[in-house]
Image (cartoon, rainbow, N blue to C red):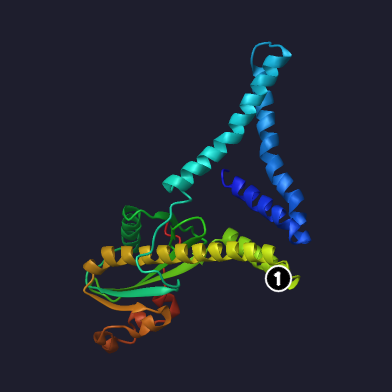
Amino acid sequence: MPEWFLIVGLLALLTGLGYSWKPLLLAAPLSLFALGAPVVHAISSGTRTCRCGPTRNFFEKARLITITTLLHLLQPLARLFGRVRWGLTPWRWLKAESPCLPKANSIVLWSEVWRAARDRLEGVESAVKQLGGVVRRGTDFDDWDLEIRSGLLGSARLQMVAEEHGQGKQLVRWRVSPKCSEIGLIVLSTLIAISAGAGTTRAWTACATVTMMGLLLGLSVLQECEAATALALRAIQERQAEQSSAQLFAGHFRRATDAVPQSMGKLRPDHPVHRGRQDLTGSYYGWW
């Protein structure tokens, strides 16, 4: 995994800050282990390559093993450089048009044209891909339908539920929630703890450096979550709003239930909207 060398670099930086705050020297063994793992793998690969060739003298074998080992070490570094430079997965960053704090959003559409839930979700998925996003589909055990990734640290999860009202009419609800990656949260929490520990002992060099790293990481998490949320909302509006007669509400999900057509107040007691939670929230989670 090319991103492994980012962990090596982070541990090496923390080890270097050990001159300012001695507890950071505990990162030295972890740094050696993180660096030694790919080195040992590269040496073993070079040794196996030498065994497969014809018989050579000692110097030829040593030169072959050295070259093969260096190539095994340079290959993941080259892949990491290419991913970051060209924005390849999982480094495909998206820029939010209007930066703001990420929050859960919802859109409620009243549609006069009936469409299957699968078709609606596939339409949104196609729109996200056309806009340059990366989409992952939920499974039968997930409580979300689509996940839109903005980068390595943040994403947005989309849920959809459709209420049937007869004669091909539907009330479609979409919910988009930001989702921070577990790796990003773990690293951010670790940096915050280290910064707080260094600050309490007045190791200002280590505290300032780690704090800056934490701020940059936190801003990256927020930016990626907001970009993914904005991309999901844009895809829904482009693919669904033009096929619906009215967009009733866009905002906080809990208030979306208040945005319903006036004609719905005249529904019969046996209508599906009055039958209880099962019919009202029959979402299509894990529709693959």
| Quadrant where the image shows the C terminus | bottom left
| Quadrant where the image shows the N terminus | top right
Residue depicted at 56% across the width and 66% down the height: 215
Q: Relative to 180, does residue 133 appear above or below in the rendering?
A: above
Residue depicted at 41% across the width and 78% down the height: 253
Mark 1, residue position = 199
Q: Relative to 123, does residue 89 appear above or below in the rendering?
A: above
> Label 1 sits on what residue type?
Gly
Q: Is residue 217 left or right of residue 190?
A: left
Q: Is residue 143 visible?
A: no
Q: Relative to 56, does residue 134 appear above or below in the rendering?
A: below
Q: Whole-percent x and y of residue 223?
A: 45, 64
Q: Is residue 85 visible?
A: yes
Q: Residues within 10 Å of mark 1 (few under 14, many from 20)?
A: some
Which residue is nearer to you in this view: 63 or 234?
63
Q: Relative to 11, does residue 272 appear above or below in the rendering?
A: below
Q: Whole-percent x and y of residue 193?
A: 68, 67
Q: In this view, does 27 lie to the left or right of 257?
A: right
Which residue is nearer to you in this view: 111 or 70?
70
Q: Whole-percent x and y of residue 221?
A: 51, 63
Q: Whole-percent x and y of residue 198?
A: 72, 67
Residue depicted at 67% across the width and 15% down the height: 60
Which residue is nearer to you in this view: 212 or 226?
212
Helix, strand or loop under label 1: helix
Residue depicted at 38% across the width and 64% down the height: 96
Quadrant assignment, res 286: bottom left
